[in-house]
Image (tube, coloured by chain):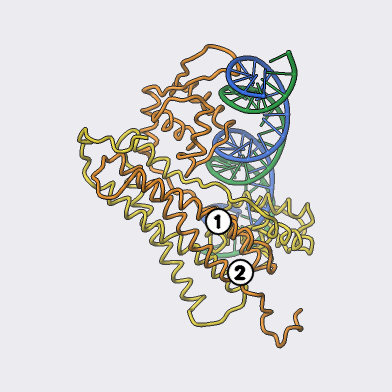
Chain colours: A orange, B yellow, C blue, D green
Amino acid sequence: MSLPHALLTALIEQSSAGSELARRFDRSIGFFWHATHQQIYRELGRLEAAGWVESLPPAEGRGRKKVYRVLPAGRKELKRWTDAHQDPKPLREELMLRLRAEAAVGPTAVKHDIERRLALHRDKLALYQQLEARDFPPGRTRSREAQVQHLILRAGILMESMWVDWSEQALAVLRKPVRKPARRPAGTGR
Amino acid sequence: MSLPHALLTALIEQSSAGSELARRFDRSIGFFWHATHQQIYRELGRLEAAGWVESLPPAEGRGRKKVYRVLPAGRKELKRWTDAHQDPKPLREELMLRLRAEAAVGPTAVKHDIERRLALHRDKLALYQQLEARDFPPGRTRSREAQVQHLILRAGILMESMWVDWSEQALAVLRKPVRKPARRPAGTGR
DNA sequence: ACAACCATGTAAGTAGTTACATGATTTA
DNA sequence: TAAATCATGTAACTACTTACATGGTTGT
C-alpha cells in the first residue's frame, strides 16, 4: 500500500488537485513510482473518506478543480507508515525473462529492445545529472531534508548508470554474429 | 503477461511439475521474477488449456504430481513473445517513497530498513559472484547461449553492487546526528 | 493407523491497467 | 458557437497476494 502514502507526501509538499498530482507523478515523484490519474482520483476519494485529507473548494460539479490538503491525521498516518518496517519487494525484470527465453529458443529481436533501452537510460541519466548539478552543487553544507532528497536522486543516477553499463555489455554480446556452435563448417546444424 | 512465458522457458529447460517449478522460482529464475505456487498452478492450467503444454501423468487425483511438457505450439508462442517489442515497465521503489516521506515529516526508522537491505544485498552479491566464478570462469570461449546466461547473471551482480554502494551512502547520511536545520539557506528553492 | 508433510487446488481481496464517459473551460 | 482540451469520474478486467482446504504419500 504505497500509493496513498505517496499522495500524502506529495500533498504535504504542496496541496494540489488530482490533475496536478497526476502531472507531478510524471516528474519528480514518478522517478521511482508511477500512477495513472484513475488510480489517483480513486485514492484521493479514499484518503478523504479516511479523514486524512480534506478537499476545500468549489462545492459541486464534475469538471471542477478540487484542491486537497493534508489533515493532521494524515500526517500522523504518513509518519506511522514511514516508520514501519517493510520487507523489500522482489525484483521484476521482464527483460531478463526474455533473455532467458532467448537462451532457450535461440536468437530473437531482444537486441533491438536493449538498444532502445540504452538510449532511454542515457537520456534519464543525463537528466538526473543535470538536476544534481542544479539542485545539489558540491561544497555546501545542507539540511537533513535536502540531503535525503539528494540520496533519492543519487539512487536514480546510480540506477541509470548501471543500466547503461549493462546494456553496453549486453549489446557487445548480442551483436556478435551468431556462430553455430562450431559443429564443423557452417552447414551442419540440426 | 510475463509469467506464462517464464513458465514456458522453465519447462523447456526441464519438464517439471508445479511444485518443482515453484521451487525453481525461488532459485535461478527467481533472481528477476517471483511467483507463488498459486499463480503457478493457475497458470499451468491456462497453458494446458491453450495447448502450449501437456501434462503427462498419473491420470486423476488431487495430490498427484503432474509433470508438464512444452508442446511445439508453446515453443512457437515463446519465440513470438520474445521477439515482440515491449516497453520497459516504470520503476517501483517503495523505499524511495519512504525516504521522500521522511524528508517531509522528519526522521523515522527507515534507517534500520536500509541497514537490513545492505546486509541482504551483500549476501546476494556474494552469492552471485560465487555463481559467476563457478559457472563462468574467465578465459574461455563460450556458446551464445552461455553468454546470454552470463549476461543475466551480470545484471544481477551490477544491480546488487549498485544497491550496496547506495545503501552505504545513504547510511552515511542517515546516521549523522540530526542537527536542527540551522534556520539558514533554504537550499533548494525551485 | 496416525502424524507430518507434500502437491494441488479454491476463494476472497487488493493494486494496477485500459477504455470510456461527462461536465467545465478555453480557444478558434 | 463549435471544437479542443481539461478535470473528474465509472466500469471492467488482469495480475498478484493471502489464507485456507483437500487428497496422497511417507515415516514411525
Q: In x, y percent, where is residue B4?
A: 68, 54
Q: How crowded is mark 1: few (under 14 residues within 10 Å), some or many (20 or more)?
A: some
A17 vs B8, left or right, is left
Q: How much space separates mark 2 and mark 1, taking CA atoms?
A: 16 Å
Between label 2 and label 1, give the one nearer the viewer.
1
Q: Which chain letter matches label 2?
A: A
A155 vs A23, left or right, is left
A97 vs A162, left or right, is right
Residue ID for mark 1: A119
A39 vs B44, left or right, is left
The amino acid marked with disc number 1 is Ala
| Residue A68 in sight from this viewpoint | yes
Q: In x, y percent, where is residue C7?
A: 64, 58
Residue ID for mark 2: A174
**Closer to the N terminus: mark 2 or mark 1?**
1
Picture quadrant of residue A112: bottom right
In the rendered image, the quadrant that contains the C terminus of chain A is bottom right
Is disc 1 placed on a helix, strand or loop?
helix
